[in-house]
Amino acid sequence: MDSTNPFIAIRSLVKRYAEGDLRRTLFDDLSLDIDQGQFVTLLGQSGSGKSTLLNLLGGIDLPDAGQIHIGDQALTDLSEAKRTRFRRRHIGFVFQFFNLIPTLTAEENLLLPLELNGLTSPDRRERALELLNNVGLGNRRHSFPERLSGGEQQRLAIARALVHDPLLLLADEPTGNLDTDTGARILNLLQTLHRQTTITIVMVTHSREVATRADRILTLDNGRIWEAP
């Protein structure tokens, strides 16, 4: 994509929040471009605003000033209801603690985003089950999350985040709750899925080793963002 027309465009972003009787400025005039199909990792110390930036990109939170564009959509101009619909249709989330619904089977967890988006055709369902096979869980489709290992739950969470063909995948420490070997397998899976699609990925991590798996490494520090060469 032409760098003058980035897929994600953050412009003059300002975000403040209350800390006791004080107002802390987390971002001040933050700007960033990310092209379509890039895999970007976001490093930074605890409290630097990594997860907050993901929430802003996902439309879960709004900035105090500035603009966020995803594709041709000005996310910050949408009402809460419209942001919810945009997020549900075009954005996938992967979290450190999986956030699977314990009363639903693996298959039911996977199909939930399709049902929320009204995408319940037989073809869609078949593709969803193919995705479950692609992440190595085809034989666990009727298992409940508590019967799955941590790595299996995270693989299911990744499949669920991708099942509705989102434009953007936001991952918040997706390997942070896993052992080293399992975490490496999850990263391999993300890289493989990224190569097979045109999806854009923004992943928060505290590990520089994990960050090197991406196309770009960004670091948040004191409300500013800089890029490793």
Image (cartoon, rainbow, N blue to C red):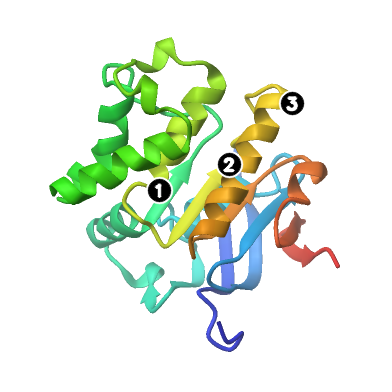
- Vertical position of residue 191 compared to residue 184: above or below: below
Mark 1 vs mark 2, CA separation in Å: 12 Å
Task: Categorize mark 2 by other alpha carbons within 10 Å: few (<14), some (14-19), many (20+).
Answer: some
Camera-nearest residue between 5 and 10: 5
Camera-nearest residue between 131 and 177: 131
Q: Circle 3 sits on which residue?
A: 180
- Vertical position of residue 59 compared to residue 183: above or below: below
If the image is split into quadrants, where does the N terminus sit?
bottom right
Which amino acid type corresponds to the residue marked 1 in the rendered image?
Answer: Leu
> Earlier along the polypeptide chain: callout 2 or callout 3?
3
Residue 121 vs residue 33: left or right?
left
Q: Circle 2 sits on which residue?
A: 189
If the image is split into quadrants, where does the C terminus sit?
bottom right
Q: Position of residue 159 (x, y in %)?
A: 42, 40
Which amino acid type corresponds to the residue marked 3 in the rendered image?
Answer: Thr
> Earlier along the polypeptide chain: callout 1 or callout 2?
1
